Image (spheres, rainbow, N blue to C red):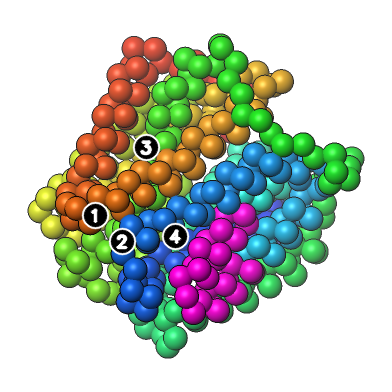
Amino acid sequence: MNGDLRGWRPCLLAGAVFAVCMAGTTLPTPLYGLYQEKFDFSELTVTVVYAVYALGVIGVLLLAGNASDAVGRRPVLLGGLGFAAVSAVCFLSASALGWLYAGRLMSGLSAGLFTGAASAYVMELAPRGGSSRATLVATAANMGGLGCGPLLAGVLSQYAPWPLYLPFAVHLALVALSALVLVRLPETVRDRRPLSTVRPQKPGLPPGVRPVFVPAAVASFVGFALFGVFTSVSPSFLSQSLDVHNRAVSGLVVALAFFASTAGQSVVGRVGVSRSLPLGCVALLGGLALLAAALHWDLLPLVVLSALVGGAGQGMSFRGAMAAVATAAGAERRAAVISALFVVAYTGISLPVIGVGLLVGPIGLERAGLVFIACMALLVTGASVYLLRRPVPAPEAGVAR
């Protein structure tokens, strides 16, 4: 048993570094209310500050998403940790709104560098024959890290001093520790090339991929949009409509959505891709319905249920979508098609959220949320109907893990 654990130690340590980086991207979630009081900005500004993160992620995925294949995993991940550290410093220095924009952009650049490189690194460091378990480690590190961010910030800002500073100071220390861990881990890319050889990844959709890509992209868009709403405006809803002013509770509600996503992704291997994508869409629809009910009746238990059900649906649908489009694309176009899927997903985490922010002023937070839910429900219902009529094929061995 000890020998088995030693064999898995590099993989688990890389997963821990992955989680630390992703936690920083959601760390500000329960703090937006405090920033609103400090800088006196609107709900629309909250959503724009949040969405700047997606611009950084998309930019890196398109321009340098394949950089770690050339220069190696560790240099790219160290760069990602560097951007995470700069993000934390921006928030620690925040004396005006511009610092928040800068911090979110740096956070997006960090996540963009980590998303593909860290997932590949975790799987490459796993012992031989452990690819399935390594995929679960990467998934848990990614989504679990995203969930730990608001939970950590919520608890520290509620029960410790310096609520707008201590969470980022703690994260900065964790980033420094992660860098020390990373430099002691082995490099897994053998044939490294100069950074000058890296070329932008242009998303592409071969004609044969489009019938599978469209419903997969819609499901990804809706799932990420749901996460976007939870991580940007749900703390405001909890405080304004439900009179929940405890930031630890707000952080926990958001964290539950990400933890549920991890659980949803973990069952895809047993359910099968051809079933997990439509089932994930149905769960997303259920999560949206529960969120609508929570907005209408102002009930905290329904918010919690919507986070759990919607998060599980996002996990199932997104992992199913990744496997479906990867299979349909073929090896020679797979990277371009997956890049296109990520661009759609991260567009979902930004544009609908800004739309909610635009509507808050004229019609109020609750009605804006209901409009968002109605639009997302129409999209995911259309995808569900399409998938029931034209199920996606089972992936090839080795594509969906």
- Residue 89 sits inside the magenta stretch: yes
Location of residue 196 with respect to 82 vertically, above or below:
above
Is disc 3 in contact with disc 2, using a CB cutoff of under 8 Å? no
Q: Quadrant of the N terminus?
A: bottom right
Q: Which residue is mark 4?
A: 49
Secondary structure mostly taken by the magenta-highlighted segment of the chain: helix
Residue pictured at 46% horizontal, 40% vertical: 347
- Where residue 94 appears, as percent x and y from the top left, is 51, 76
Dot 2 alpha-carbon crowd within 10 angstroms: few under 14, some 14 to 19, many 20 or more: many
Residue 50 visible in the displayed image: yes
Q: Quadrant of the C terminus?
A: top right
Is disc 1 in contact with disc 2, using a CB cutoff of under 8 Å? yes
Residue 43, label in figure: 2
Dot 4 alpha-carbon crowd within 10 angstroms: few under 14, some 14 to 19, many 20 or more: many
Q: Is residue 197 left or right of residue 124?
A: right
Q: Which one is earlier in the sequence, the residue at label 3 or at label 2?
A: 2
Q: Is residue 50 left or right of residue 107?
A: left
Query: Helix or strand or loop: what does disc 3 sit on?
Result: helix
- Where residue 8 appears, as percent x and y from the top left, is 69, 53
Q: Which one is earlier in the sequence, the residue at label 1 or at label 4?
A: 4
Residue 360, label in figure: 1
Q: Which residue is mark 3?
A: 222
Q: CA distance from mark 2 to mark 4?
A: 10 Å
Q: Which residues are magenta?
A: 85-110
Q: Which one is earlier in the sequence, the residue at label 3 or at label 4?
A: 4
Residue 148 visible in the displayed image: no
Q: Which one is earlier in the sequence, the residue at label 1 or at label 3?
A: 3
Is disc 3 in contact with disc 4, using a CB cutoff of under 8 Å? no
The amino acid beneath tag 3 is: Val
Is disc 2 in contact with disc 4, using a CB cutoff of under 8 Å? no
